[in-house]
């Protein structure tokens, strides 16, 4: 169960890493026609692209330091779920997003399910060492 958790966490964290890399390299052109893009907007999209890549790098640390990683894991997952809730709010405010983004929103909010899974993995590890 421990290995499955570690692999699933890395796979789940790799998705925003890829999306972040796309935002970093493509900038706002990934989202809007060039005539609507300003320097400020493009800079923000690229900045947040780098921020989107961070959870994967932290997930590598979490996987390598599983026994002491609970606080970092909760912070990353809570921030991810909050981001999903913010996207859901935008959908309510401005209309339904593309179906793929609905999946992203569900994925982000559902990321909190890693918390009980982590606790289960740690309980099982504690039982195995006792």
Image: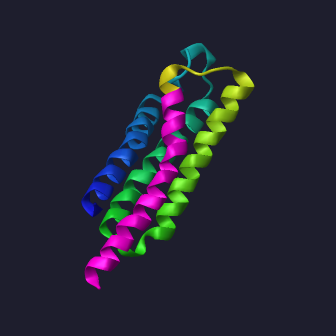
Residue at 40% across / 65% down in the picture? 120
**Quadrant assignment for the C terminus:** bottom left
Q: Determine which quarter of the picture holds residue 61.
A: bottom left
Q: Does the magenta stretch include residue 129?
A: yes
Q: Is residue 34 above or below residue 68?
A: above
Residue at 57% across / 47% down in the picture? 81
Q: In the current view of this chain or complex, which residue is farthest to the bottom?
A: 130
Say how many tags the image has: 0
Q: Is residue 107 left or right of residue 57?
A: right
Picture coordinates of residue 75 (x, y %)?
54, 61
Q: Is residue 37 left or right of residue 53?
A: right
Closest to the observer: 34 or 101? 101
Q: In this view, does 110 lie to the left or right of 61?
A: right
Picture coordinates of residue 7 (x, y %)?
28, 53
Residue at 30% across / 67% down in the picture? 64
Q: Is residue 105 above or below residue 37?
A: below
Q: In this view, does 111 lie above or below 107?
A: below
Q: Give the range drawn in magenta.
A: 102-130
């Amino acid at each position: 169960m421990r290995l499955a958790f570690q692999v699933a966490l890395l796979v789940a964290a790799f998705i925003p890493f890829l999306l972040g890399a796309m935002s970093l390299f493509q900038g706002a052109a990934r989202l809007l026609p060039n005539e609507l893009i300003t320097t400020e907007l493009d800079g923000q999209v690229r900045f947040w692209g780098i921020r989107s890549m961070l959870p994967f790098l932290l997930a590598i640390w979490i996987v390598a330091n599983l026994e002491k990683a609970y606080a970092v894991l909760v912070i990353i997952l809570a921030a991810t779920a909050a981001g999903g809730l913010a996207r859901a709010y935008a959908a309510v405010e401005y209309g339904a997003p593309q179906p793929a983004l609905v999946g992203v929103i569900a994925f982000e909010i559902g990321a909190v399910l890693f918390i009980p899974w982590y606790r289960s993995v740690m309980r099982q590890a504690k039982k195995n060492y006792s």
